[in-house]
Structure formats: C-alpha cells, structure tokens
Image (cartoon, coloured by chain):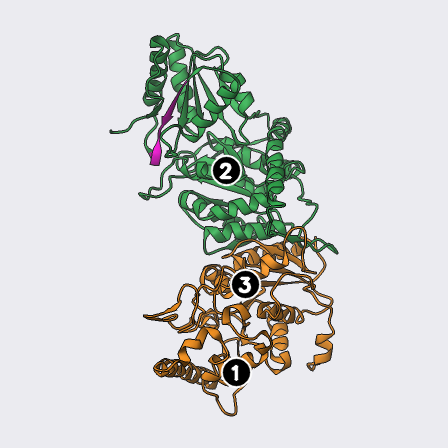
Chain colours: A orange, B green
C-alpha cells in the first residue's frame, strides 16, 4: 500500500504521553515513530535495554507503554527478546495464543554498540524473528554523556573531555549497521528524522514485518549531550544526511541500497557547527581536525557508494 | 510400574526435562553440565519434545532468554555450571525479583581461578543470596526426583520464584548409577500445565515487567520476595508428600541419618553425604554414636527444623565445599551457627572447608572429622573452629 503520511500520523500513540523523557529527546521521537510501523491489529512486545528510555517510561507503578513491555538489564535486550520470541513460537505451536505479535528490542548506542553487542550479535545470527532498534545518540547519555563506540571522533564527552592536551574522543566511531549487515540478516537499515519521517516510517514497517532478524539504526540527537538548541533537531538531522555523515540506506537480503544521495554533498562543518560537543573544532588552529573529520566522512561515503553500486 | 535404569546424573535430569517438555530451553555449554543441553537437543531433533530450544551465545544470554520466555508465559529451563552461573549472576537477581519460576539444573563446579572443572560448591554458594530456591542432591536419583518436583515448588502461587536443582559435578553428573524413573505420563500429570496469572502474551492484557523501582517501592518489593521464598519451605514439604505418593520415595527439607541419638553430627551437602554415611556406619559399629544431617533445601534455610534435629549432639561439624573468604565460617557453618545461637543452643561447632576443586573426599578423611569431634568432646577444648580438611599446609 502506498505511503500515506496523514494516515501514519493519525495512528493511536503506542507510547503514551506523561513519561519523563526530556523535552525534545531524539530517543522518544525515534520510538514513537518506529511504533507507527506496527499495523493497528497487531500486538507487540517491547524489550528495552536499561537506559534513559527505560528509567523514564516505566517507573513503578506507572508505565507509558500501551503494548506489553519488558526491561531486563543493560546488555541483554537481544537475548531477552529472543526468549520472548521463543515463547511466542512455543505457545503458538501449542495452540495457547491466537493473536499476532511482533517483537521490538530497543536500546541506546551504549546498550547496543557496546555492552549489548554480544547479545545483539547472537540474536541476529540466530535470525530471531524480531527487530532490534538502536536509537543512536552517540554516547552514554543516561549516566551523563560518557563516550561509547558510537561517539564520533573529537566529540567532547565526560570521559573524553576536551582539555589542554585533548581534542575529545581520539577514535573513530564503530559502524554497527555494517557489522549487523555482515551477519547476513534479511533486513538492515539506517535512518534519522528527515523527509517528514517518511524514510523512518517505511523502514520501521519493513523491519517489523520482515520475517527473521532485522536491525534498524536511527540517529537520535540528544539535546543535553550534543549541546544544541532543542528546536534545531530537524536541522541537525538534515545536516547529518546532507553531509553524508549519516547516510540513509538499506541492506535487504545482502543487497545494499542507497536511499538518498544529496544533490550537493555539504561540508561536515554543516553538521558539526551547531553542536556544543564540537565547539573546540572551530577554534583557530584546529582546522586540521575538521579536515580529518571530512576525510573520514568522505572515505565512508565512498565505501557505501561502492557497496550500493555492486 | 517405575522404570529401572542405569544413568548418569546429567542424563537423569535430562530425562526429567524431556518428561516435563518445557516451552522454551535456552542453553550454552559448559563442563560438566554440557551433556544436559546435548541430551535435550537430541530429544528436540528426534521429536521427543516440542520445546523451542535456543542455542544462545553465552550463559548471560541463556538466563536472559529464559527470563524473557518465562515472563511471556512460557515454562522455561536451562542448565549450567561454575563460571556459567557466575556469568548469569546479574540475571539470577532479575529472575527472582521479577518472580519468574525458571528452573535451572546446576551441576556444581569450582569457580575460577585457577580454572578447574571439578566439583565444589563455590558456584552455588556465591548465588545463595540471589533469591532463588536452592535444592541439593546426593546422587542421580535425587537429582532426577528433585527436578521432577522443581516446577511444583517454584510455580506455586504463594512462591513464584526461580529454583536451582543442584548436583555435584562429575561425582554425580557423570557417574552412572542405578536409578528408578517414573513413567512419562506420571511425571506430566504430576508437574501439570503452566498457567500463570499474568504474562506478556496474555490476551487483551498487556503488561510491563522489570520497572525502575524508586526508594519508595524497592524495599517493599524485596520484602515481598522474601515472603515468597519463606513460603517455599512448606510448599517443598507438601510437594514432597505428593511425590512420595507417585514414587514411593520420601523427601524432606533435609535427611537425618542416625542423628536421633547421635553425639557427633556431621552436616553436609551433596554427594559427600553418601561418604559421610559410610563413615558414620563404620563408627557406629565401634560403638561411637555418629550421625549425618544432609541438607536438601538450602534456600530458604530451614533453621528451626535443623536446630531441632541436631541440638542434642555433643559436637557438630559443618562441612563447607567452598571458601567464603571471611576467615570465620563457610556459608553452611555460618547458617548453622546463627541458627543455634538464635535458639539459645550452645553446642560446640566445628566448620570444615573440604573437597575444593575436586579434592578427594574419602571415608577416611570424613572419619577424621568425626575423630576431631570426639577429641573436642573429650577435652572440652574446641580450638580452631574454622579448619581445612585434606590440604597440604
């Protein structure tokens, strides 16, 4: 069925208001829009890694989740979701359930790229019928902006602070969507908040309804951690895509598909300049750091173009 | 008619698992429990069960998946040993606090380091405060019987807590002994269907599990958990009574062997109890009143009942197959001494660390403990209360 923005946006909310996430939080935006990928008649179980989302949406005795929800621990959303999906398969086989359920694991980049990496890898390799959604805000925001393997190079975080002999995080970020694609799962996609959310809505629905394991990586800015004006979130997401820092692509059954190619690739400064975590890069004498950032973006973009042209 | 067989402890427990035919079984291999998921996988491969078997990538994930499955309304089980249990540590607490009656076949093995694959109780004793019910076996028959009874205890509405059914690595898990199995239908009827009140996949009743517990609620949750654990004591006895009716084999919270008139009582857990009984028999022949109290239920700890069974002794020896590094007492020794103290009993207690990492436990070595108890009784001097058995100092 053709995509209809009005229809998708008029679906009932599956994450109720009244939770305690920050105003303007990218994670919340990601989750609400992923849940719009669910068909109204279908039920879901959400498996949430420990993080901002979990502590802010399910503080006993209140829950913001309209669907069934389980939080287990930080590093095991993949394995917990495997157990839930396994239970569904078992109970369905034994005739104890007749509803259709979908299984969505959600974690931040800390719980996904780092501490939950093994659990995620296992769940993907077993081709568990689930989608793992990473809302990637590029640091451990819940504990106070510590670096993760998703943090971009030279970001100022509380464990890679900029100082007299430090320019922020010295290493490049891990490319998790690539790594999960190499698990040869049926569906992997990367997206963020652009194109009036069409890209996100369509990918969420595909990820949820692809049989087997699916992985959705969503860049979800954090106003506190990235230090920008909350209302700038859409501009930042757009800049991430237009600079090719965060390309939109899918890997379907091993086939790499570029979903959007900017007419004119913007310089990386356009993405970095509005964020306080990169402020030091714009100081006099640090021009070479910006050059390095550009070089890395260019290298990865070329690599992606190659993969998508095969 | 029951079935006479010759099985290792691992295979005996696996047979119980096949008879129960759980909904979900996530597992990861580790010596000496590896055979259990192996046997179970062969049951799956040959259609003897229709369980969803999840070959996870670690023990942390096997317990995480068991929690996810159990929370979804599926009867779930797994097996592990030693470092596998240690790797699950965090999840053991989550399973208990979420009140999920997962069953775990634990084949006791020493924790690293140095790495060692043989029996001791450092794995299970480290997890004694995780909120699980802990049941121990002396041999393959008890391991099988305990596993058949496991879900009836764990899933009881007044309990709703996870349960670990323990047997000693290699000594019980790999030694092949005679055993009497129950017929499949008898076990299925005894265990029954799992019918939880609330679960993630319940029709028209979505639920949320695993909340953030603020200081306003956390303590009440933990207190309620204790109540469930305490209830497990009576439920264990009730279930054992029903089990005796179908099997002819009786179980209690512990086994009393020649303790009624004993001057010297050894309190012991696991396979060493058989050796201890042999030692007691030989001493009885010489006119020495030796007895053995073998723990079956360690969590919840049946303190009052044990005190009533041992308080008349002249000397008691508590045998700990683990070191708990406090320099004062092992886990069993500490429990027994606290129980006696609370009851106002002043019987003399020795506490031995023995059999670490598979160190041999013999009739001779345990006889020496009974001899030590006699020396204390005769001299009235206890001396060092915390001792090591069969160690090169």
Q: Residues within 10 Å of mark 3 (few under 14, many from 20)?
A: many
Where does label 1 land, which residue? A239
Chain letter for mark 2: B
Where does label 2 land, which residue? B129
Q: Which quadrant would the C terminus of chain B be assigned to in this image?
A: top left
Foreground: disc 1 or disc 2: 1
Secondary structure under tag 3 reads strand
In this rendering, the answer to whether B391 lies above or below A29 is above
Task: Place residue B229 in its image quadrant.
Answer: top right
Q: How crowded is mark 1: few (under 14 residues within 10 Å), some or many (20 or more)?
A: many
Of A239 and A105, the residue lying toward us: A239
Q: Judge from the rendering whether residue A28 lies leftward or rightward of residue B122; answer left or right.
A: right
Numbered mark located on residue A107 in the image: 3
Residue B182 in picture, x, y percent from top left: 58, 34
Q: Judge from the rendering whether residue B92 lies leftward or rightward of residue A19; answer left or right.
A: left
Proximity of marks 1 and 2: CB atoms separated by less than 8 Å: no
Q: Are marks 2 and 3 on the same chain?
A: no
* Magenta segment boundaries in residue numbering: B349-358
Residue at the location (55% across, 31% down)?
Answer: B300
Residue at the location (28% across, 29% down)?
Answer: B391
In this rendering, the answer to whether B11 lies above or below A11 is above
In magenta segment, residue A46: no
Of A174 and A157, the residue lying toward us: A157
Chain letter for mark 3: A
The alpha-carbon separation of the residues under discs 1 and 3 comes to 24 Å
Secondary structure under tag 1 reads helix
The alpha-carbon separation of the residues under discs 2 and 3 comes to 29 Å
Secondary structure under tag 2 reads loop
């Amino acid at each position: 069925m053709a995509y209809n923005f009005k229809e998708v946006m008029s679906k009932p909310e599956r994450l109720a208001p009244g939770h305690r996430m920050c105003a303007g939080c990218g994670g919340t935006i990601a989750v609400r829009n992923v849940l719009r990928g669910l068909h109204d008649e279908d039920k879901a179980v959400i498996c949430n890694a420990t993080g901002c989302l979990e502590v802010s949406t399910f503080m006993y005795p209140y829950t913001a989740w309209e669907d069934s929800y389980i939080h287990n621990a930080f590093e095991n959303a993949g394995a917990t979701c495997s157990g839930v999906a396994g239970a569904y398969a078992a109970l369905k086989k034994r005739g104890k359930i007749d509803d259709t359920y979908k299984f969505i694991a959600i974690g931040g980049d800390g719980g996904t790229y780092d501490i939950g990496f093994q659990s995620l890898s296992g769940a993907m390799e077993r081709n568990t019928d689930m989608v793992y959604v990473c809302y990637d805000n590029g640091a451990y925001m819940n504990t106070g902006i510590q670096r993760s393997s998703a943090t971009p190079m030279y970001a100022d975080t509380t464990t890679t602070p900029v100082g007299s002999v430090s320019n922020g995080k010295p290493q490049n970020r891990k490319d998790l969507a690539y790594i999960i694609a190499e698990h040869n799962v049926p569906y992997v996609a990367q997206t963020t908040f652009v194109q009036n959310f069409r890209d996100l809505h369509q990918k969420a629905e595909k990820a949820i309804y692809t049989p087997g394991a699916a992985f959705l990586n969503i860049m979800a800015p954090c106003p506190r951690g990235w230090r920008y004006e909350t209302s700038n979130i859409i501009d930042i997401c757009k800049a991430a895509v237009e600079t090719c820092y965060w390309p939109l692509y899918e890997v379907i059954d091993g086939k790499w598909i570029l979903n959007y190619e900017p007419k004119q690739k913007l310089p990386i400064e356009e993405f970095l300049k509005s964020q306080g975590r990169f402020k030091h890069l714009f100081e006099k004498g640090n021009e070479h750091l910006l050059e390095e950032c550009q070089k890395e973006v260019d290298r990865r973009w070329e690599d992606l173009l190659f993969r998508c042209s095969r | 008619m029951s079935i006479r067989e010759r099985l290792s402890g691992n295979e005996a427990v696996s047979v119980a698992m096949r008879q129960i035919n759980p909904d979900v079984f996530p597992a990861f291999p580790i010596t000496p429990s590896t055979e259990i998921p192996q046997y179970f996988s062969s049951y799956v491969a040959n259609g003897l069960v229709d369980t969803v078997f999840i070959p996870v990538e670690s023990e942390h994930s096997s317990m995480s998946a068991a929690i996810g499955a159990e929370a979804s309304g599926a009867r779930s089980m797994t097996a592990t040993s030693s470092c596998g249990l240690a790797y699950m540590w965090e999840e053991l607490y989550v399973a208990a606090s979420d009140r999920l009656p997962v069953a775990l076949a634990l084949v006791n093995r020493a924790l690293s380091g140095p790495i060692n694959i043989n029996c001791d109780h450092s794995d299970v004793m480290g997890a004694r405060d995780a909120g699980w019910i802990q049941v121990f076996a002396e041999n393959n028959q008890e391991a099988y019987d305990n596993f058949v009874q496991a879900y009836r205890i764990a899933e009881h509405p007044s309990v709703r807590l996870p349960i670990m059914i323990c047997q000693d690595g290699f000594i019980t898990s790999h030694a092949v002994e005679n055993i009497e199995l129950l017929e499949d239908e008898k076990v299925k009827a005894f265990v029954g269907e799992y019918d939880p009140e609330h679960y993630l996949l319940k029709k028209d009743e979505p639920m949320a599990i695993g909340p953030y517990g603020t200081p306003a609620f956390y303590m009440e949750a933990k207190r309620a958990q204790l109540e469930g654990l305490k209830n497990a004591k009576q439920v264990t006895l009730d279930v054992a009574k029903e089990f005796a009716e179908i099997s002819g084999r009786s179980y209690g919270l512990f086994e009393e062997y020649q303790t009624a008139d004993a001057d010297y009582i050894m309190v012991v857990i696991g396979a060493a109890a058989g050796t201890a009984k042999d030692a007691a028999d030989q001493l009885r022949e010489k006119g020495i009143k030796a007895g053995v109290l073998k723990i079956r239920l360690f969590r919840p700890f049946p303190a009052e009942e044990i005190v009533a069974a041992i308080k008349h002794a002249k000397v008691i020896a508590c045998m700990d197959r683990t070191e708990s590094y406090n320099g004062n007492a092992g886990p069993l020794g500490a429990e027994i001494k606290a129980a006696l103290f609370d009851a106002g009993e002043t019987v003399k207690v020795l506490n031995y660390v023995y059999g670490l990492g598979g160190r041999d436990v013999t009739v001779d070595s345990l006889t020496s403990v009974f001899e030590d108890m006699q020396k204390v009784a005769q001299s009235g001097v206890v001396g060092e209360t915390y001792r090591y058995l069969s160690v090169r100092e």
